[in-house]
Image (cartoon, helix red, strand yellow):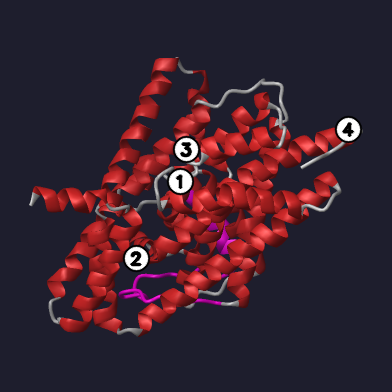
Amino acid sequence: MKSIIKKWNDLSLIKRIIIGMAVGLILALVVPQATAISILGDLFVGALKATAPMLVLFLVMSAISQHKSGQKTNMRSIIVLYLLGTFLAGLTAVIASFIFPMTLMLKDAAENVAPPQGIEEVLKSLLMNLVDNPVNALIPNANYIGILFWAVLLGIALKSAPEHVKDVVQSFADAFSQIIRWIINLAPFGIAGLMFGTVSEVGIQALQDYGKIIILLIGTMVFVALVVNPIIVFVNIRRNPYPLVFKCLKDSGITAFFTRSSAANIPVNLKLCENLGLEKDTYSVSIPLGATINMAGAAVTISVLSLAAVNTLGITVDIPTAVILSVLSAISACGASGVAGGSLLLIPLACSLFGISNDLAMQVVGVGFIIGVIQDSCETALNSSTDVLFTATAEFAARRKNGEKIEF
């Protein structure tokens, strides 16, 4: 038994998830009446639902409280590019979802949902959620907008706190991240239960829906990588951006696709920055920072899956609300945790904008984990390659203004 467990643990998470999907599918087709299997999926989603609010609170609080300012680099330009790129990625995903609306298979999807009646109600709901009691935001309702708001305020308030206090906050963030890693390590069993429950209830048609969602996600990420980002680069350096874009995708994106971790890809990005002749004082800071806040792929994932839930529930989204969703998905993406599938845990925050309950939102997260084998790899490739792309863009733009020659 120990040898079997060791061999199982030696497999990559991707392979284990694929096995879990296959087992869930086979069991749903062979023994659809064995409904007890779906409990594994319920336990998996329930564990995520219980942990995600605390994870968001401490991650954002810690990141803001630990922020240091005053270093003389191109960091201001790089951060602007990071935030702009993430926002435009979220906006692109929203537009793509309007053009190609998707739906999901959710249990009891139409129950207990009160869709907003236009932008006024959305703004009112947003403002009221912001000032919700922090304990109430965390425990009974999982009000992610309130959690994010209080995390930002607490993080700002703690910036002047003693270092040992900040270390405690960081320790809690690390602890909840570790708990999430433990839960995600059990994802193959949870996904087997989710796959079984979905296919046994609604049939093989659900797999086609997953395929459509994957195509929309990957197509949007490719559009961001090959159209949106090159436009940003061209506006800044006034040169053909594609040699730089393709170099970043080839040397950084490919390895990030297989590691599925922006943090794990940091050494690759640092070496690429060195090869591009960038200033070490700048990229030694911007690359680790980008692995945390530059999350264009996460913004795409959050926007697409949230709007798929909205479409499933028949909620109408107007243009102002769509813009708010783009901003919210960008902010949420910046808080995405460093674990595989971290962006999925922030989908409930975006869903709460439309009055979607936490229970339904976590079902969407479950769908995200099913398609995550492909989605998370593409998302990480876009995120990590863009870290180098925007770091180089900011420095080349500064060189252009100084009349220096740009080579890449």
- Give the mark nearest the N terminus, 1 or 2: 1
- Give the mark nearest the N terminus, 3 or 4: 3
Rendered position, 264 above or below 29 = above
In the rendered image, the residue lying farthest to the left is: 1
Kindly report which numbered mark, 2 or 4, lies closer to the viewer in this rendering. 4
Residue 351 screen position, x and y as percent: 46, 61
Rendered position, 171 above or below 369 = above
Viewer-closest of 274 and 58: 274
**Disc 4: which residue:** 404
Tell me the element at label 2.
Answer: helix
Rendered image quadrant of residue 96: bottom right
Kindly report which numbered mark, 1 or 2, lies closer to the viewer in this rendering. 1
Find the magenta span and give its range.
101-129
- As measured in the structure, the alpha-carbon distance from the residue carrying label 3 to the one carrying label 2 is 24 Å
Residue 137 screen position, x and y as percent: 38, 47
The kind of residue on which mark 4 rests is Glu
**Disc 3: which residue:** 60
- Give the mark nearest the N terminus, 3 or 1: 3
**Disc 2: which residue:** 363
At x 50%, y 25%, the residue is: 66
The crowd level at tag 2 (other Cα within 10 Å; few <14, some 14-19, many 20+) is: many
Residue 343 screen position, x and y as percent: 46, 52
Residue 286 screen position, x and y as percent: 62, 33
Residue 313 shows in this picture: no
Tell me the element at label 1.
Answer: loop
Number of numbered callouts drawn: 4
